[in-house]
Every structure is written in structure tokens, then in C-alpha cells.
Image: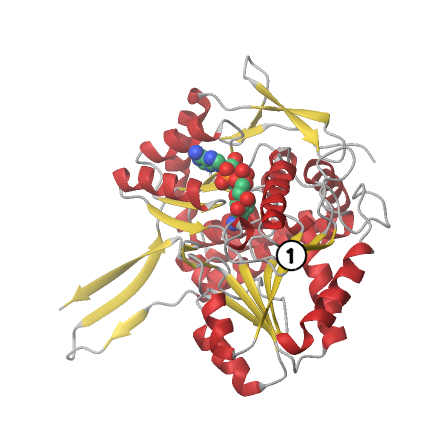
Amino acid sequence: MGYETDLKLFIDGIWKTGEGRDAHTVLNPVNASPIAEVPYATKADLDEALEASNRAWPEWRSMDVEKRGAILHKAAQLLRERVDLIAATMTQEQGKILAESKAETLASAQLFDWYAEDAKRDYGRTLVRPAGQVSRVIRQPVGPVATFTPWNFPLYLLAKKVSAALAAGCTVISRPPHETPGVGTELFRALADAGIPKGVAQLVHGESGLVSETLIASRVIRKVSFTGSTNVGKHLMRLCADSMTRVTMELGGHAPVLIFDDCDLEKTLDMVVPQKFRNAGQVCVSPTRFYVQSGIYEAFVKGFAERTQKVKIGNGLEADTRMGPLANSRRPGAIEALVQDAKAKGARVLAGGERGDGGFFFQPTLLADVPNEAEIMNEEPFGPVAVSRPFDTFEEVIEQANRLPFGLAAFAFTENGRRANLIGDLVESGMVGINTFAISLADAPFGGVKDSGFGSEGGKEGMESYQVVKAIHQA
Ligand code: NAD
């Protein structure tokens, strides 16, 4: 299976490459070998994209919602038809196993279908007024949008932003990460082939600083949606402050998992272990801090370690691989440093703990008895590492779950209904999964609190994030 995506910029309806533009090499993380060259946008390309975005907006926003929806449905259909090609590109650029790449492609198609329909049900409201007077509240598209997305779910996170923004009537300029330009290109190819009018959806690969500074400073862009690290998110918010540009920030997490002694232990282990190592743990809602009630702690970590040792790592294109490499050369070293620090502070390594051979691999790892002073208890590992420690009381575990500045996702496993309700109320996070990890769904809002960012993606809230509210009063 080769790499088949033709990497180009898509500006004002034209696919562009060459012509003296810098090119960046794309690596396959399985063996660090080059697989493609991606052209980088120049300042002139960005200016052209801005001009086109601004020009295309009035027509797109006033297009009949059925017609707009038909283009989004068609893009969804093309993503499904091209699932094999897109998934192969994703696995070769990012490392995740082919089954996950295919599932991500299909979930991305579903987002376009969902928003194509949701846009038709975007009702405003009428306020009570004396006879003959009318006050109505409507939502309108915010304007041209810029999106910056990461490499961990290179298609889904991009699709989440682009589908909602386009459905809301906004034009979009997207900068995908340099690790996974092909997946982004395939999304825009589907939109182009679905008949998106020129200038409405544009793709600019490029140097992140140049792209974000140029787009945000332009005053054309009215909204920035970013997914990535808290540090870069704060940097972009500062840029946006100068132009009063609205933002949605989907940032890091450090999800606690509360395991109570009344859970079904074997069933829970069979769920949590594959979930931890999905996408090699490079998931912002990855289950990470396992707090396990004392009575079942040793049995839990033993069962977790046994299952972890059986996770087969390798090339994601091979059918029996269960976990691929990390996405880039920065990750193995960062994770190794966190594991070494935890060991030095008294953590037990019950599985893995080392880099893998070749490429950007790190072994699936379980650490037990990890003290709060260890950096990994405070910093998002964003890799295949689970950390665990025992707890005794409900109050204690809620305090531990809430002790970090992050608040994206939290999970709990318990058969006690009253306890489950309380967890839903008391844990400080944007999403809570109780006896489930299914928290990222087309119809549900997804987003964090505290340092995990603000604003929601997905669901009705996802489209509202690309709208402004207007009240119109008529006497
Ligand atoms: P990063 O924050 O440096 O980069 C995230 C994305 O933002 C990348 O696509 C990057 O190219 C882009 N970016 C970086 N600087 C930018 C700028 N000035 N303007 C616009 N875009 C910019 O993260 P990373 O080094 O790729 O990953 C490190 C950490 O980021 C991870 O450990 C994890 O904590 C976090 N992360 C979170 C998510 C998430 O889903 N929330 C995804 C990826 C990474």
C-alpha cells in the first residue's frame, strides 16, 4: 500500500504547488522515512486566500440551506467512497492502525451529514411584545473562519470545525498540521469535488507562525478555532485579543478515571486497556490517571499489566498490529522523560516503560503507585502511558480528580447509581463518561473547562460557535 495523496494548497478554487514555494518533508513515523513533500503557503498565498474568503462569504451565507446541505452531504459521501485511500494516507502519515484510520474517516463523514441537517433546524426566537410590535432574536454566521488542527485525529478534528462552520454559512481557511497534510488535503478534495464554490473552503499548508499571524492580523478572519496544546492556545488567544477575534479553544486534558470496587472488574479492564492505547494514547480525552479503590487496586493493576503486555505494536498497515508508533519525533523523548521522573519518585513500572525499536515507538506502559509530585501526574503525557494509584473514600477521589488545572474529560466505573449521579455533578470537566468512553459524538457538545479551553464543538453548540446573535426590535 503506497502513499497516494497529491499534496497541494487549495486557494480560491485552484490546487497549487511548486512555483518556488518552500516544501516540507512528510515522514512516516513507523520508520522515520520520507513519504512526500508538502508545499508551504507564501505570504502572497495567504493574502489571496483571505481575499477569496471575504469575497465568497456573502454568497455562501445567503445560499439556500438545502443547497448548502447538499454539498456537505456530497462531501460526506465522497469521504466514505474514498475511505481506503484516506485511511492508508492517515496511517502512513500519523501511525495509527488502519482500522482506527478507517473509523475516523467514517466518523468524519458523519459530521458533514449531521451538520448538513442541523443547519436546517436553526430556529431563532420571538419575544413577547405589545400588539403590532415584534422583537426577534436570530443567529447569523460570524464570517470567515480560520482553523488550526493537530495531528492526533487529523481528519476528525478538522472535519468537526469545517463541517460546522460551513453549515453555519461561514467561509473557512484551514491550516492542517505539517505531520498530516495529506489527510487534510483529502478532506478539501472531497469538498472541491462536491462542488463547494471557490473561496468558501481553502486549505493552506505552511509554517504555523506565519499562517496564524497573517490570518489573525488580517481582520478578515472573524473566528479562530484551535485544537492543540494549552501553550499554543494561549498564544493564539493573545493574537486574537488584538483583533477582538472570537475563539474556540480545545486544549489538552489529563483525564481521571475513577474505578470503584463495585465495578465489574474484568469487563472494566477489557474496556479501559484498549481505550488507553487507542491512537498510542495521543488522545486529548485519553483515560490517564487511574484512581482505583483500595480493595481492588492490586487486582486491577495486575489485570491491566497482563493485558498491556499483550498489545502488539508495529506498523499500523499490518492487520494484527494493535498500536502504532507515536506521530512525531518529539513524543518518544517527552514520554521517556516523564516515565524516568516517575520512576525516580517511587513509581512501579508494571508494563513497558521503554522506547520501542526504530521509528517513533514507545511501549504500552503502566505505572503504579505514582505520587502526585511526579511530573506525569501533572503534565499531559499524550502517549501510551497509564498512571495509577489507590484511593479509599469518595470525597478523596473527587478531590484528586479535580486537583489539576485541566478539565476536559473524566471517566468513572461504578454500578452505584447515586454515586454515578454525584460524579456527574462534582467532577470539573467538560465531559463525563460513566461506564463508557463514548463521549465524542456528532450530536453532543465536546469541550473543556479551566486550562482545557472553552467553547464547544459537536452538537448544536458546535454550530452556534460559528454564529453571532442579533436582536431585532420593531415597533
Ligand atoms: P502544539 O500545541 O505545538 O501543536 C498543536 C497544533 O498546533 C499543531 O498542529 C501545530 O502545528 C499547531 N501550532 C503550533 N504552533 C502554532 C501557531 N503559532 N499557530 C498555529 N498553529 C500552531 O502541540 P504538539 O507539539 O504538536 O503536541 C504537544 C502537545 O500538544 C501534546 O503533548 C498535547 O498535550 C497537546 N495536543 C493536544 C491535542 C488535543 O487534541 N487537544 C492535540 C495535539 C496535541
Q: Position of residue 6 (x, y in %)?
A: 68, 29
Question: Looking at the figure, which quarter contains the N terminus?
Answer: top right
- Graded by Cα atoms within 10 Å as few (under 14), some (14 to 19) or many (20 or more), the crowding at tag 1 reads many
What sort of colour scheme is used for the picture?
A: secondary structure
Asked if residue 197 can be seen in this view, the reply is no
Q: Position of residue 69 (x, y in %)?
A: 53, 55
Indicate whether 51 appears above or below 187: above
Classify residue 18 by image quadrant: top right
Relative placement, left or right, of 301 versus 142 is right
At horizontal 27% and vertical 39% (from top left) the residue drawn is 243
Question: Which residue is label 1 attached to?
Answer: 386
Indicate whether 249 appears above or below 470: above
Classify residue 235 by image quadrant: top left
* Secondary structure category for the residue under label 1: strand
At horizontal 35% and vertical 35% (from top left) the residue drawn is 216
Relative placement, left or right, of 193 versus 357 is left
Residue furthest to the top in view is: 20
Q: Is the CB–ligand 1 distance for label 1 below 8 Å?
A: no
Relative placement, left or right, of 332 versus 470 is right
Asked if residue 245 can be seen in this view, the reply is yes
Q: Nearer the viewer, residue 280 or 207?
A: 280
Relative placement, left or right, of 308 versus 112 is right
Q: Nearer the viewer, residue 363 or 469?
A: 363
Q: Position of residue 413 (x, y in %)?
A: 62, 75
Q: Position of residue 362 (x, y in %)?
A: 71, 43
Label total for image: 1
Q: Nearer the viewer, residue 377 or 9?
A: 377
Classify residue 189 by image quadrant: top right
Tag 1: amino acid: Ala
Question: Looking at the figure, which quarter contains the C terminus?
Answer: bottom left
Q: Nearer the viewer, residue 73 or 163?
A: 163
